[in-house]
Amino acid sequence: MNHTKSHELMAEAVKVIPGGVNSPVRAFKSVGAAPVFYDRAKGDRVWDADGNEYIDFVGSWGPMILGHTPDVVLDAVRAQLVKGTSFGAPTELEVRMAETLVEIVPSIEMVRMVSSGTEATMSAIRLARGFTGRDKFVKFDGNYHGHSDALLVAAGSGLITLGIPSTPGVTAGAAGDTIVLPYNDVAAVRAAFAAQGEQIAAIIVEPVSGNMGVVPPVPGFLEGLRAVCTEYGAVLIFDEVITGFRVALGGAQERFGVTPDLTTLGKIIGGGFPVGAFGGKRDIMECLAPVGPVYQAGTLSGNPVAMVAGLALIDALRSPGVYEQLERSGARFADGLRGAAEAAGIATCCTRVGSMSCMFFTQADVVDWPTAATSDTALYARYFRGMLERGFTIAPSQFEAAFVGLAHTDADIDSAVAAAADVLCRLA
Ligand code: KE4
């Protein structure tokens, strides 16, 4: 493939943007390739600046569950653009979005819109601290909840991709109340609460980890977190920025039948526009200004363009059979890759929840960060480059998720599996 234009753009980009990218994982640092600059997309296809066509399994890191530029979203956005792109004042659209989230997400009785997942999780932690009057909170090794200071501790996604153990600029004071525990380890959570439970405001968890690769909750993990939070009066926060509307219409909390006190959302609910949300129990949410004393704000919060895009996308996801199709396509993709690796004699641990999946290049049973970390990232990098050259975009990191959406046909999935088989047998 010819990547001349992408290389030229990268040479210009690095002069004016740190690393040439506006988010580190886009730099392809861990996969030994020069980043590809995208030009356009439709359905499950993306085209780069050189006109190369790819079948896309990144999907903008999750939002493109309908595929790229779905007509229902484009039509809604076009109609809104001429009415106004931002008012800094309340609109009916925000009411309809809030009512939709309240109706669909089991834990949400009230919700506040923001403009990113980072804002959502940062605000949820502050709210939990304000509600309980406690300072400490629990997160899990390998979970990524955006880049606010207190959450950039033992975080996943770009930090583990780039091997950044801790981030300069995050002060001991900012991170000193963050308790990091092993994912899928309820005993460790119980021990931490036994020791200092009266100081712990919240547990925040990815109910299905998507930022150390895909790591499902082991049976009893989410239920255990729920029980401990109830016992100690701590706030259970499900960070469903990835899993929300992905693993079920009502997210992981619907799929696994465990209801948190607060939920954070992002990605899918914006239909590809900048959006985040945090919501939950009324008595907690009403601690937020202007009702209560916990301050949180945002110029573009509830942006009307993002609202119509998200409402159109969510409406499409409510059609009968959508999640059955996502389940089938997710399984077709993940099972196909697993079979290709087995045929090539390459040890992998393949994980999947619905239409999000990961192929870890390890023979370990991946259940947490230490087991995920046994993956051969150099081998993954060779696999990534092989797939890219064959016209398939997958996550430029072993420690991210692959996403299948409604635009992926069986034929496109099968062609990705065939390409993977060809790449993997050359890696063995
Ligand atoms: P944003 O601030 O990037 O919108 O959301 C932060 C966030 C919060 N919670 C979870 C579970 C998330 O996965 C994310 C962001 N996800 C990463 C990809 N794993 C975004 C990609 C990037 O950083 O460029």
Image: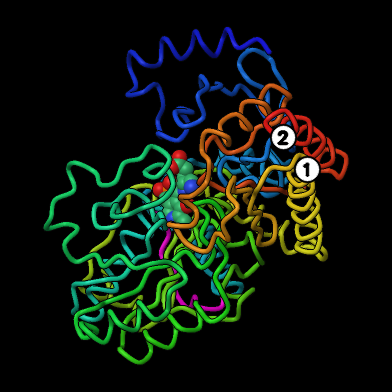
Q: Do the residues labelled 2 and 1 touch (CB within 8 Å)?
A: yes
What colour scheme governs how the chains and residues are painted in the rendered image of this protein?
Answer: rainbow
Q: Which of 309 and 252 is in front in this view?
A: 252
State the residue lying farthest toward the right: 411
- Residue marked by disc 2: 424
Magenta stretch holds residue 347: no
Label 2 element class: helix
Residue 302 visible in this rendered orientation of the protein: no
- Residue marked by disc 1: 340
Q: Earlier in the sequence, mark 2 or mark 1?
A: 1
Q: Nearer the viewer, residue 12 or 7?
A: 7
Residue 163 visible in this rendered orientation of the protein: yes
**Distance Cα–Cα, label 2 vs label 1:** 7 Å
Q: Residue at x 54, y 52 (%)?
A: 307
Residue interval drawn in magenta: 106-114
Q: Position of residue 374 (x, y in %)?
A: 48, 49
